[in-house]
Amino acid sequence: PEVEHPILLIDEKPAMSANLDSFTLWHLAYCSFIFDIKKRYLNHLKKSNMHTPKQLRDWYMAHITGTYIRAPFDIKELPKEILNEFDISEDELYFRGRDKLQLNHIADAWSWKDYFKSDSVLLMGDGMGHRTYACRYVGMNAQGFDISEWAVKNNPYGFDETIYWAQDIMDLKTQSLQYDLVIIYDVLEHIHENNLDEALNNINQKTNKYILISVPMIGDPNLYNDNTHKIFWTREQWENKIKEHGFLIREVPDNFLFKNQLIIGEKI
């Protein structure tokens, strides 16, 4: 009798001792495609002269039993046409599984607060805003931005645009403030090498004292695990490039997590 959700009806009231847990209900709503598979199979049996009945039966059974061979692929490689058809954002796929605050975000923020003693902090390219939140959680005056409007809009902390906004690190003309500390985690390796000088110039203009950069370097397997990475450099190459843009390289404290991929610069 239900339009959307069929229900079981019992014609007669069962005896109180009846065991109503002795049956299994097979619910096929989430695999309705198997009816289409059956229809295609029967249609091919009638009309197809390309395959033998055994080949068709093998095809049918492989689909019905879920054993049809599928080639694995990186979901981030889905073409835009398919994403658009199913109303999926590329950024939604990229940030899938990255929407949770981690303990290391808070631990990092405490270390930064103790070491830099900065009154103002800017997080560049902070994704879903985890590190911006962590800095504010430990009492730092922090703001942040990310190039992804989707990530900013869906940040889990309810930040408004005065705290967290959408912006490209390559275009900071609308923001004239300077900060004691600028933090850039896992951003610069995504920028084309030809644009790196401009990005570092922008970073220089935003800080009046320190920068903290995290990048995967040669020797780190993570450098090759993301197909969006564009720069593959050694630590020496990164440090030399940062020096070119008006910074002294400072030693990274031992208590900083993942210090092997961190670079601290002090503005000259």
Image (tube, rainbow, N blue to C red):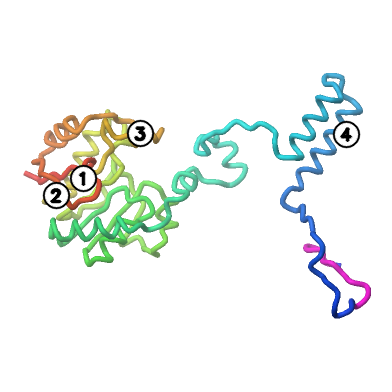
- Which label lies toward us, 4 or 2? 2
- The residues tagged by marks 4 and 2 sit, at their Cα atoms, a distance apart of 69 Å
Residue under circle 3?
229
Place of residue 44 in the rendered image (x, y in percent of width and height, measured from the top left)? 86, 28
- Return the residue nearer the eye: 25 or 182: 25
Residue at 77% over, 52% down? 28
Dot 3 crowding, Cα within 10 Å, few <14, some 14–19, many 20+:
some
Q: Above or below — where is 176 with respect to 3?
A: above
Q: Which residue is mark 2?
A: 253
**Point 74% across, 40% down: residue:** 65
Q: Residue 247 location, x and y as percent?
A: 10, 41
Disc marking residue 42 = 4
Q: Disc 1 marks which residue?
A: 259
Q: Residue placed farthest to the top in the image?
A: 50
Q: Earlier in the sequence, mark 4 or mark 3?
A: 4
Circles 4 and 3: CB atoms closer than 8 Å: no
Report the quarter where the N terminus lies: bottom right
Q: CA distance from mark 2 to mark 3?
A: 27 Å
- As measured in the structure, the alpha-carbon distance from the residue carrying label 1 to the one carrying label 4 is 62 Å
| Residue type of the residue flagged with mark 4 | Leu
